[in-house]
Image (cartoon, helix red, strand yellow):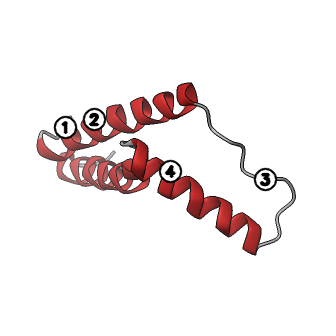
Amino acid sequence: MLSESRYLQIVRASAWYDLAVTAAFATPWTFALMLGGLADLAQQLALPGSVPVFEAAHVLMANLLGSVVIAWAILRIRHSQR
């Protein structure tokens, strides 16, 4: 069984991870930069296929995901509780 302090450390660490991974999804311009970077990486690695063109509804859903996850991560960092 985990002690409460160890549990809260894990919760905060996972929140920081979520914040770092999804920060690029929060706004349309950061999402476009991330998507362009992923497309460049896929091209450099000569991966089969291509990164699809995202329509406005796709970008909106990605931004919604980023905003919700960032808000939840900040809440877990600032107010961690069991």
Instruction: Identify residue for label 2.
Output: 72
* Circle 4: element type: helix
- Work out which quarter of the rendered image holds the N terminus and state it: top left
Residue that extends furthest to the left in the rendered view of this protein: 79
Secondary element type, mark 2: helix
At x 24%, y 54%, the residue is: 9
The answer to which of marks 3 and 2 sits earlier in the sequence is 3
Q: Quadrant of the C terminus?
A: top left
Which residue position is annotated with label 1? 75
The first of marks 1 and 3 along the sequence is: 3
Q: Residues within 10 Å of mark 2 (few under 14, many from 20)?
A: some
Circle 3 — which element? loop
Q: Amino acid at mark 1?
A: Leu
Question: Which marked residue is nearer to the observer: mark 3 or mark 2?
Answer: 3
> CA gap, disc 4 to disc 1?
26 Å
Q: Are marks 3 and 2 in contact (CB under 8 Å)?
A: no
Judged left or right of residue 20, residue 56 is right
Coordinates of residue 2 in the picture (x, y in percent): 30, 48
The residue at the point 30 percent across, 55 percent down is: 16
Determine crowd level at label 4: few under 14, some 14-19, many 20+ residues with C-alpha closer than 10 A: some
Residue assigned mark 3? 50
Please, what is the three-letter code of the amino acid marked with disc 3? Ser
Above/below status of 8 relative to 48: above
CA separation in Å, label 4 and label 3: 15 Å
Looking at the image, which residue is at 85% across and 53% down?
49
Using a 10 Å C-alpha cutoff, classify the residue at mark 3 as few (fewer than 14 neighbours), some (14 to 19) or many (20 or more).
few
Residue type at numbered disc 2: Trp
- In depth, the one of 37 and 6 nearer the eye is 37
